[in-house]
Image (cartoon, coloured by chain):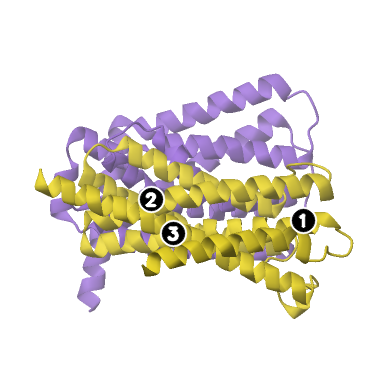
């Protein structure tokens, strides 16, 4: 019952967010209507990194406990994170085309999200190349944790060392990217909404995983 | 306590000596690595050696050659144990961490040999513009290859345990190594144009700290890779 209410609420919430993004929120000065991509691009990128973080946490749990379910959840999170990261890359490229003039110019931000995609792909390649399930789970977990080490360097250090055109990802007073109060409200609402969608997808897939595991045990 | 650390160093040295002896007898990794770098270098030199290239292009070429030659050599470090069936004996005689550290030292030695081969040959064949800071260039190459070896050794173990072809290693290693490569290419270009060390001190700090982090994480994770 509670779940149904949550789902309906999420549906209404997202409809409101999408409408607010186009109709209610004002466009930012200098960027015009292009600024509206922030309500979709940033939440997508946020979920992409969040899913990867969750995947890494499940990998750690797998190495500590050795339950096959943790490994499957890590894999599912990586798959979902991959899709969200691709969407963030595409929306970012569209933004780049209309503000910087080209879709792709190896801006430090684009470099780092590209490497994130490469890490995800390498993770899937590794998974598909190991036959034995226990060994696959262990090696994939180790790689996931190891590769995560480079993520802080990519997300926070490289864009600070090299000059980037990307608007500051962390909204702060000194970032120079001041958001209008209404914009900020819609932006936060969108973050919450996208995180809700992510939670829903994870909830569905982990139920599928549970069913498959039970099914296996019975056979 | 003194005795433990002493025996730790002895154990690591034993692994390095074993790998060195193996290498002197078969010369497998060394020949593969040197020939690979030579082939790439000759191809590059043969096709574009007559043009005068931009400094950044020189530094990118140097690192492309080093990266792929290093991958061909480092992927052997654990697969050779799997192939010859000696991994079990190795695991019986030392803990996973000691095996890792031994392999790390050996891989670092291999990469330093690689750089000692590639850099002079590159200077002879490609004629980078004069006025480069050679001492700084060598220092950068050695620091970056330390980081490369540190980040690749654990992945080489994963590839060996995955029981698959060596071609998996560049795929796994590239995203983890890219921060190192980008920094190395940038600072190599800087050294080739004759800059001094103080101006790129942050690059050195970056490479060393990256090395410290990957080695720490590798030491925590290596038991899960090697122990079944």
SS of the residue under disc 2: helix
Which of these two is toward me, B140 or B168? Answer: B168
Residue A93 appearing in the image? yes
Which residue is pictured at 69% across the width and 54% down the height? A108
- Along the viewing direction, whichever of B10 and A173 lies nearer the viewer: A173
The percent position of residue B212, horizontal first and vertical second, equals 46, 65
Q: Is residue B87 shown left or right of residue A10? A: left
> How far, Cα to Cα, is label 1 from label 2?
48 Å
Residue picked out by circle 1: B195
The chain in yellow: A
Q: Secondary structure at mark 3?
A: helix
Give residue B79's quadrant in the image: top left
Disc sitting over residue A76 in the figure:
2
Q: Is residue A4 left or right of residue A174?
A: left
Q: If the image is split into quadrants, where does the C terminus of chain A sit?
A: top left
Compared with A126, B1 (above or below) is below
Chain containing mark 2 = A
Q: What percent of the width, then of the height, locates residue A25?
A: 77, 66
In the displayed structure, A107 sits above or below B8; it is: above
Give the Cα separation between the discs numbered 3 and 1: 54 Å
């Amino acid at each position: 019952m509670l779940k149904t209410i949550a789902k309906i609420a999420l549906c209404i919430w997202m409809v409101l967010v999408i409408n607010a993004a186009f109709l209610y929120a004002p466009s930012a000065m200098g960027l015009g209507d292009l600024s509206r991509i922030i309500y979709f691009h940033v939440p997508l990128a946020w979920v992409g990194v969040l899913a990867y973080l969750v995947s890494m946490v499940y990998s750690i749990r797998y190495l500590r406990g050795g339950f096959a379910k943790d490994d499957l959840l890590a894999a599912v999170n990586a798959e979902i994170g991959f899709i969200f990261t691709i969407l963030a890359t595409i929306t970012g490229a569209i933004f780049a085309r209309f503000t910087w003039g080209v879709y792709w110019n190896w801006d430090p931000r684009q470099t780092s999200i590209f490497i994130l995609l490469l890490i995800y792909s390498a993770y899937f390649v590794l998974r598909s190349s190991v036959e034995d399930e226990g060994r696959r789970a262990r090696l994939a977990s180790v790689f996931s944790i190891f590769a995560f080490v480079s993520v802080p360097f990519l997300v926070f250090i490289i864009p600070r060392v090299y000059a980037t055109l990307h608007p500051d990802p962390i909204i702060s007073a000194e970032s120079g990217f001041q958001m209008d109060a209404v914009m900020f409200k819609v932006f936060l609402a969108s973050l919450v909404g996208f995180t809700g969608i992510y939670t829903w997808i994870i909830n569905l897939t982990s139920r599928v995983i549970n069913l498959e595991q039970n099914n296996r045990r019975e056979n | 306590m003194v005795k433990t650390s002493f025996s730790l160093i002895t154990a690591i040295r034993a692994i390095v000596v074993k790998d060195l002896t193996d290498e002197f007898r078969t010369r497998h990794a060394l020949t593969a690595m040197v020939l690979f770098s030579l082939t790439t270098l000759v191809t590059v030199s043969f096709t574009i050696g007559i043009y005068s290239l931009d400094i950044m292009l020189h530094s990118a070429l140097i690192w492309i050659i080093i990266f792929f030659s290093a991958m061909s050599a480092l992927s052997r470090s654990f697969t050779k144990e799997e192939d010859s069936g000696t991994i079990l004996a190795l695991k019986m005689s030392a803990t996973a961490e000691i095996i890792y550290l031994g392999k790390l030292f050996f891989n670092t030695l291999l990469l330093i040999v690689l750089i000692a081969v590639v850099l002079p040959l590159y200077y002879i064949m490609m004629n980078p513009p004069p006025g480069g800071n050679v001492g700084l260039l060598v220092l950068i190459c050695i620091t970056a290859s330390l980081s490369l070896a540190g980040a690749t050794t654990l992945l080489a173990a994963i590839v060996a345990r995955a029981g698959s072809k060596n071609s998996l290693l560049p795929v796994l290693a590239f995203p983890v190594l890219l921060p190192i490569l980008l920094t190395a290419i940038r600072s190599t270009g800087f050294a080739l144009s004759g800059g001094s060390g103080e101006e790129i001190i942050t690059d050195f700090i970056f490479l060393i700290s990256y090395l410290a982090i990957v080695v720490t994480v590798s030491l925590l994770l290596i038991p899960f890779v090697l122990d079944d």
